[in-house]
Amino acid sequence: MAITIDQIRHPDYTVAIQDWVKWRICYLGGEIFKQRYLKQFTQREDADMFTRRKELSPIPRFAGAAVDEVKNSITVRLSDVRMDRSLTLMLVLVRMVA
């Protein structure tokens, strides 16, 4: 069977997508995060205790809230960016590369 173009992935993409999925699940929080990443602490915690702890564990989206806070603070500051200096910025960047 021939490989089609939609089955081909760059090796860096293939490695990075695992992290992207983990970060997305962490950002969203909730039940999916709990099912995938909540683990037993020690061998002293038997299966019943772990199941009970898993049922009682709330998983708020702390990471998502922090990311949203940074995104919002950057968005608020975008009005402070002066677009009339873009030519100057480009000249500086060209000098840095050269």
Image (cartoon, rainbow, N blue to C red):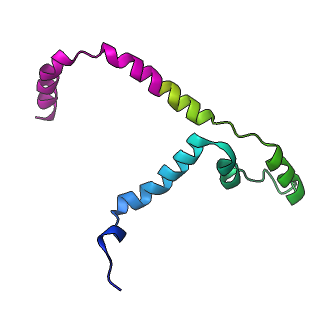
Residue 45 colored magenta?
Answer: no
Write the start and end of the magenta stretch as one range. 71-98
- Residue, x 38% and y 58% (percent of image)? 13
Q: Position of residue 93 (x, y in %)?
A: 16, 29
Q: Position of residue 31 (x, y in %)?
A: 69, 48
Snapshot quadrant of residue 10 = bottom left
- Residue, x 63% and y 36% (percent of image)? 61
Q: How many marks?
A: 0
**On the picture, is 32 further left or further right than 13?**
right
**Residue 58 position (above or below residue 39):** above
**Residue 19 position (above or below residue 84):** below
Which secondary structure class fits the magenta region best?
A: helix
- Residue, x 59% and y 42% (percent of image)? 28
41, 4: nearer the viewer: 4
**Residue 17 position (above or below residue 74):** below
**On the picture, is 91 further left or further right than 59?**
left
Quadrant in which the N terminus appears: bottom left
13, 41: nearer the viewer: 13
33, 11: nearer the viewer: 33
Q: Position of residue 62 (x, y in %)?
A: 63, 33
**Residue 12 position (above or below residue 72):** below
Quadrant in which the C terminus appears: top left
Snapshot quadrant of residue 43 = bottom right
**On the picture, is 63 further left or further right than 77?**
right
Q: Position of residue 8 (x, y in %)?
A: 33, 69
